[in-house]
C-alpha cells in the first residue's frame, strides 16, 4: 500500500471516529416518565390522565386539575398557568395534590423531572 493510500485511510478513520464521537455527545430526546398522572378535571369533575409523560416538557392539563396523583417514576411540578411558570406544588413519586381555595386555583400544567 502506498503512503498516499495509508494517509487517506487515516484521514477517513479520523473523520469517522470524530463523527461517531459527535453523535454520542448529542443530547438525546426527552425521556418519558413511566406510569400515569391521573387528575380530576376542574371544569367537569371527570377523571383524566397523562400516560408515560415526557420529562422536561411543560404539559397542559386539559380542563385544569382540581386533584392529581403522581403515579409516575419522576417528580411532578404542578403549575397554576399553562406555560409552567407559576409553581403550585412539587409532588413526589406516589404523592397527591389538591386544589385549595378560596378562591379556587386549579393546576393548568405540569412538568416531570428530578427534584
Image (spheres, rainbow, N blue to C red):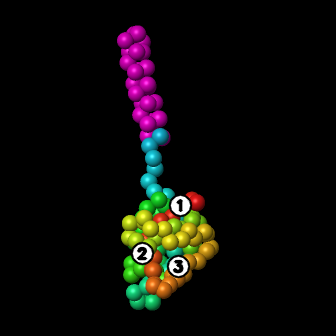
Residue that lies at the very extreme toward the front in this rendered image: 102
Residue that lies at the very extreme toward the right in this rendered image: 94
Ranked by sequence position, the earlier of labels 1 and 2 is: 2
Work out how far the residue at label 1 is from the one at label 3, CA to CA, in angstroms.
Answer: 16 Å
Q: Split into 4 quadrants, where in the image is the C terminus? A: bottom right
Q: Residues within 10 Å of mark 1 (few under 14, many from 20)?
A: some
Ranked by sequence position, the earlier of labels 1 and 3 is: 3
Position of 102 with respect to 71 (left or right) is left
- The answer to whether residue 53 shows anywhere in this view is no
Q: Tell me where residue 82 sits by quadrant.
A: bottom left
Residue name at image x 43 percent, y 62 percent: 57
Q: Position of residue 56 (x, y in %)?
A: 47, 59
Mark 3 touches mark 2? (CB < 8 Å): no
Q: Is residue 22 magenta?
A: yes
Q: Tell me where residue 8 sits by quadrant.
A: top left
Q: Split into 4 quadrants, where in the image is the N terminus? A: top left
Q: Residues within 10 Å of mark 3 (few under 14, many from 20)?
A: many
Residue at the disc numbered 3 = 68
Work out how far the residue at label 3 is from the one at label 2, CA to CA, in angstroms.
Answer: 11 Å
Mark 3 vs mark 2: in front: 2
Residue at the disc numbered 2 = 108
Q: Which residues are magenta?
A: 1-24
Q: Secondary structure at mark 3?
A: strand
Q: Residues within 10 Å of mark 2 (few under 14, many from 20)?
A: many
Amino acid at each position: 500500500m502506498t503512503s498516499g493510500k495509508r494517509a487517506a485511510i487515516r484521514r477517513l478513520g479520523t473523520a469517522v471516529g470524530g463523527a461517531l464521537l459527535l453523535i454520542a455527545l448529542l443530547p438525546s430526546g426527552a425521556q418519558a416518565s413511566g406510569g400515569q398522572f391521573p387528575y380530576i378535571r376542574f371544569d367537569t369533575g371527570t377523571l383524566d390522565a397523562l400516560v408515560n409523560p415526557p420529562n422536561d416538557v411543560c404539559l397542559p392539563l386539559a380542563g385544569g386539575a382540581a386533584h392529581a396523583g403522581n403515579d409516575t417514576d419522576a417528580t411532578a411540578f404542578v403549575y397554576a398557568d399553562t406555560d409552567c411558570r407559576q409553581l403550585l406544588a412539587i409532588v413526589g413519586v406516589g404523592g397527591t395534590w389538591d386544589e385549595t381555595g378560596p378562591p379556587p386555583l386549579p393546576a393548568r400544567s405540569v412538568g416531570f423531572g428530578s427534584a
